[in-house]
Image: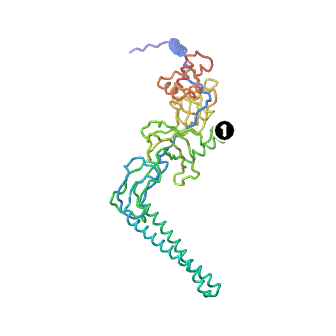
């Protein structure tokens, strides 16, 4: 078999041609494009600071109706669940033994009064006779002492009559307050005892009602510090507005106000009790209901409103956002968020006025990468959620193009999307 040799100059020429073709393909590849991201420009705005706390309702006044004398219940004179007035009779206890006791006390008092008259007359006669030495001084002293004993017996008799009258009055069991009476704990024919303080029923005043809320001592400390440092403005605890969320998720129609905050921290739970008061003319609120109260504690005038789509959390739970810097490069910013407001986050730290936060295209960029910022076009659902969060959210978040003098329609779209 014959092998022909290829000249070296032909191999060199072919290799050079291949290398030149490869270089030409590499040079003809299109350059990598700068990714485009949607941004919003944030500005500080006044945001109401609200706290949502759990709690339970309590009656404004609660009076337990208990037996104050022993006896048989003759009748009940109210309808369970009805409104009763103060002093209205609820039960009648058999008064016969107490009528007899009152008559006996009156008889004892009459006997004491008669004895007092006799001893007083005798003491007056002995006073004249002892001056004429007709009776001894000892007899006169005895007469005066007998008069004093009789006078004391009269006072004791009057006290016994008063006690008997009071016990007789206790046979009429009356309501101590005006309110709604509950279930009757006894029926006619039942025997009640004063020594056992037999519970007969309960009367509660339900208009207005108290709502006892629980707040952690840490949240209370943060609130006081914000007020002292001037980050929050408040008109005082008495003027704070409170709204109530019922068990079914609906808002209670009547606004309330704070009464006081307990000064003692519960050592087992680390919380304090805050009491609010609400009008309850329609008896919607009943004692023992679980509710949630939203308290407007003040206004934060240095907060930023950032759409939730532009905020993420790292593995430690720290809120972060991607911001376009002055050189159009991406920066990773840790944020301090306080609460959600509609479809936005209230940011208290980590941002500066005029920062451009990336809300679209965050998945295709990384910190340090150059980007092309454009006004964000958020979905209609997010836009409507941001609009519902209030005028503060709309004024606090603007698009970068709107802030720099872009077309009005695009700026309005970016602001409403925030």
Residue 63 drawn above or below residue 195: above
Residue 117 drawn above or below residue 245: below
Where does label 1 land, which residue? 230
Please identify the quarter of the rendering in which residue 198 is found: bottom left
Circle 1 — which element?
A: loop
Q: How is the image coloured?
A: rainbow
Task: Count how many numbered circles sit on residues in the image.
Answer: 1
Q: 337 or 77, which lies in front?
A: 77
The quadrant of the rendering that contains the N terminus is top left
Residue 86 drawn above or below residue 406: below
Q: What is the x, y in percent for residue 109?
A: 48, 71
Other residues around mark 1 within 10 Å, as few (<14) / some (14–19) / many (≥20): few
The quadrant of the rendering that contains the C terminus is top right
Q: Residue furthest left?
A: 189
At horizontal 48% and vertical 74% (from top left) the residue drawn is 111
**Apparent side of residue 80 relative to residue 57 in the rendered image (left or right):** left
Q: What is the x, y in percent for residue 181?
A: 41, 50
Q: 122 or 194, which lies in front?
A: 122
Q: What is the x, y in percent for residue 46?
A: 61, 31
Q: 253 or 359, which lies in front?
A: 253
Q: Residue furthest right?
A: 229
Q: 340 or 120, which lies in front?
A: 120
Q: What is the x, y in percent for residue 275?
A: 53, 46
């Amino acid at each position: 078999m014959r092998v022909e040799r290829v000249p070296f100059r032909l191999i060199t020429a072919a290799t050079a041609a291949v290398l030149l073709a490869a270089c030409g393909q590499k040079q003809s590849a299109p350059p990598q494009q700068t990714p485009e991201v949607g941004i919003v420009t944030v500005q500080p705005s006044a945001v109401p600071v609200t706290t949502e706390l759990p709690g339970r309702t309590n009656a404004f006044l609660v009076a337990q109706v208990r037996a104050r004398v022993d006896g048989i219940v003759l009748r009940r004179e109210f309808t369970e669940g009805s409104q009763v007035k103060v002093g209205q009779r609820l039960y009648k206890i058999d008064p016969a033994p107490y009528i007899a006791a009152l008559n006996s006390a009156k008889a004892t008092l009459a006997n004491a009064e008669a004895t007092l008259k006799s001893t007083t007359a005798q003491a007056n006669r002995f006073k004249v006779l002892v001056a004429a030495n007709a009776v001894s001084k000892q007899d006169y002293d005895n007469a005066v002492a007998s008069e004093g004993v009789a006078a004391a017996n009269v006072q004791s008799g009057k006290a016994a009559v008063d006690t008997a009258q009071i016990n007789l009055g206790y046979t009429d069991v009356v309501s101590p307050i005006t309110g709604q009476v509950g279930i009757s704990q006894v029926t006619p024919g039942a025997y009640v005892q004063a020594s056992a303080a037999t519970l007969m029923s309960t009367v509660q005043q339900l208009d207005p009602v108290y709502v006892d809320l629980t707040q952690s001592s840490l949240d209370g400390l943060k609130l006081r510090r914000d007020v002292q440092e001037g980050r929050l403005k408040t008109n005082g605890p008495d003027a704070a507005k409170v709204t109530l969320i019922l068990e079914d998720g609906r808002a209670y129609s009547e606004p309330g106000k704070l009464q006081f905050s307990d000064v003692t921290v519960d050592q087992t739970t680390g919380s304090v009790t805050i009491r609010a008061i609400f009008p309850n003319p329609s008896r919607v609120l009943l004692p023992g209901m679980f509710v949630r109260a939203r308290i407007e504690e003040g206004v934060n005038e240095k907060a930023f409103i950032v759409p939730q789509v532009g905020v993420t959390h790292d593995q430690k739970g720290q809120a972060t956002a991607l911001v376009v810097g002055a050189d159009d490069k991406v920066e990773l910013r840790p944020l301090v968020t306080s609460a959600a407001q509609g479809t936005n986050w209230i940011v208290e730290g980590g941002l500066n006025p005029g920062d451009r936060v990336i809300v679209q295209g965050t998945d295709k960029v990384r910190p340090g990468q150059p980007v092309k910022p454009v006004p964000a076009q958020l979905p209609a659902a997010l836009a409507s959620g941001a609009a519902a969060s209030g005028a503060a959210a709309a004024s606090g978040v603007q698009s970068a193009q709107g802030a720099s003098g872009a077309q009005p329609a695009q700026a309005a779209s970016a602001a409403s999307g925030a």
